[in-house]
Image (cartoon, grey):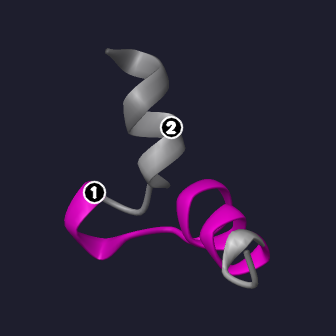
Amino acid sequence: MGNTIWEAFYNYHRPCGGLKGKTPYEIFLKK
């Protein structure tokens, strides 16, 4: 359970170079 904050940051707030600067969540919303 300690990873939930980290997971939220990783998925919703951290831009990813492989996703052209978008977050994994932004990519998910487009599908």
Q: Is residue 22 left or right of residue 2?
A: left
| In front of the other: 28 or 16 | 28
| In front of the other: 26 or 21 | 26
SS state under label 1: helix
Residue at horizontal 39 percent and vertical 18 percent from the top: 30
Whether residues under marks 2 and 1 lie with C-beta atoms below 8 angstroms apart, the answer is yes
Residue at horizontal 50 percent and vertical 68 percent from the top: 15
* Residue type indicated by callout 1: Leu
Quarter of the image holding residue 1?
Answer: bottom right
Tell me, for residue 26, which label it has, or none.
Answer: 2
Q: Earlier in the sequence, mark 2 or mark 1?
A: 1
Task: Indicate yes or no whether the magenta region holds residue 15.
Answer: yes
Quarter of the image holding residue 13?
Answer: bottom right
- From which residue to which does the magenta span run? 5-19
* Residue type indicated by callout 2: Glu
Residue at horizontal 78 percent and vertical 74 percent from the top: 5
